[in-house]
Image (cartoon, helix red, strand yellow):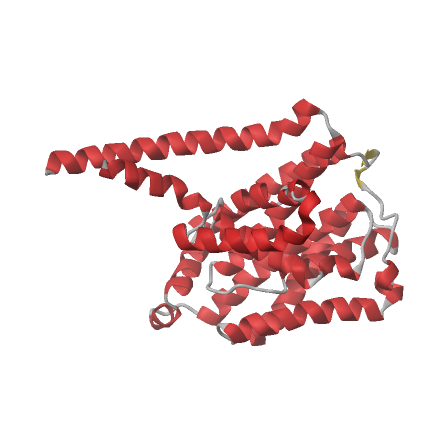
């Protein structure tokens, strides 16, 4: 019996080792693929994946305290418009615009987070949905600020002094480094005392409160961090695409981030990475059948939630258990 248990443990450990190694190689291959191919299209897809990873990472931080925001796309929009206004209207450098985007988005989250996070379950979902639509409608009503339905074009490209990243191949390293830094930041938060408080609140908010954790403040902190990361993604998006419109930050953008998070793994560090890697390029493969795109997303969500409720990142663990039983 003990021998069998030991063999099972060794088998699971070997599965994990192989799984982690394969995952690391897959990430490296995905990062290098556009560089090797040299294709402008591949660079574009890779950049969009990096931006999706950053935004979904922010949503993952909010999910770590048991909430799932449907206004995440609006915070991406706040960051995008803030950076655009700083650079185009105030003529500040690109990095100043990015910093301002993160600060302003975090401040907005801090202002609305207190009353917002008192809501639970479906009420929180509904109010965040309303906030996302409110942001879009307000932006449409102030064309002097947002360009209205026509949008704002010719947003300056990202730059560092005389170095202008106005091509996809030159912008890609910035997007990739930014995504890596955000993943590293979230990993540090997860391993800190703050991360442990997040986990305690997500698992059982009543028990966490009884142990002395300030649950309201903890949830608000997660909301601020996650929204600030979304603002960072929005700033990069604005200077990469070079065009902003209120319709860009429609409710569907928030839904796409939620789908990426859930498909990848809602509470896992690498969940947003896996979700963005799989779902961001998917519309290109479904371009010939756009009417079935949302149907496919729905079916994928049902299948994954049925067989892998913890997302695709839990697949190695599932295979390890199956391997250990044989």
Q: Position of residue 61 (x, y in %)?
A: 52, 56
Q: Is residue 159 left or right of residue 46?
A: right
Q: In this image, 16 relative to 129: left or right?
A: left
Is residue 63 placed above or below 22 in the rendered structure?
below
Q: Residue 71 falls in which quadrant of the image?
A: bottom right
* Above or below, 49 relative to 60: above
Which quarter shows the C terminus? top left
Question: Is any part of residue 58 visible from this angle?
Answer: no
The answer to which of 264 and 209 lies nearer the viewer is 264
Q: Compare residues 198 and 140 and report the one nearer the observer.
A: 140
Q: Position of residue 107 (x, y in %)?
A: 66, 64
Please name whichever residue, 153 or 216, is drawn nearer the observer in this view of the structure.
153
Task: Decide: is 324 above or below 80.
Answer: above
* Quadrant in which the N terminus is drawn: top left
How many numbered marks are there?
0
**Whole-percent x and y of residue 146?**
84, 62
Q: Residue furthest top?
A: 36
* Residue at the limit of the structure toward the left, as seen here: 1
Give how far across and how far down residue 214 sits, in percent: 44, 70
Q: Residue at x 40, y 33 (%)?
A: 19
Q: Is residue 63 above or below residue 307?
A: below
Q: Is residue 105 visible?
A: yes
Residue nearer the viewer, 49 or 318: 318
In screen coordinates, is 36 left or right of 5? right
């Amino acid at each position: 019996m003990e021998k069998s248990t030991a063999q099972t443990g060794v088998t699971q450990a070997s599965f994990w080792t192989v799984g982690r190694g394969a995952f690391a190689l897959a990430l490296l291959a995905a990062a290098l693929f556009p560089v090797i191919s040299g294709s402008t299209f591949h660079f574009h897809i890779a950049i969009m994946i990096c931006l999706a990873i950053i935004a979904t990472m922010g949503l993952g931080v909010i999910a770590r305290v048991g909430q799932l925001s449907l206004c995440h796309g609006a915070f991406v929009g706040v960051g995008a418009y803030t950076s655009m206004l700083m650079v185009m209207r105030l003529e500040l450098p690109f990095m100043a615009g990015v910093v301002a985007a993160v600060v302003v988005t975090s401040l907005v989250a801090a202002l609305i987070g207190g009353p917002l996070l008192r809501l639970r379950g479906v009420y929180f979902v509904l109010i965040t949905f309303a906030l996302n639509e409110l942001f879009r409608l307000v932006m449409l009503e102030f064309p002097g600020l947002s360009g209205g339905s026509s949008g704002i074009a010719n947003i300056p490209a990202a730059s560092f002094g005389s170095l202008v990243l106005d091509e996809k191949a030159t912008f890609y390293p910035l997007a990739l480094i930014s995504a890596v830094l955000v993943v590293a930041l979230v990993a540090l938060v997860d391993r800190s005392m703050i991360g442990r408080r997040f986990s305690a609140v997500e698992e059982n908010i009543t028990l966490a409160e009884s142990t002395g954790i300030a649950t309201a403040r903890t949830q608000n902190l997660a909301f601020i961090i996650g929204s600030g990361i979304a603002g960072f993604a929005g700033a990069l998006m604005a200077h990469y695409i070079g065009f902003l419109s209120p319709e860009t930050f429609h409710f569907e953008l928030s839904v796409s981030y939620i789908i990426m998070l859930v498909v990848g793994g809602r509470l896992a560090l690498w969940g947003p990475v896996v979700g963005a890697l799989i779902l961001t390029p998917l519309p290109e493969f479904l371009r010939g059948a756009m009417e079935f795109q949302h149907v496919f997303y729905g079916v994928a969500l049902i299948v994954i939630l049925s067989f892998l409720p913890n997302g695709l990142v839990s697949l190695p663990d599932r295979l390890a258990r199956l391997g250990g039983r044989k």
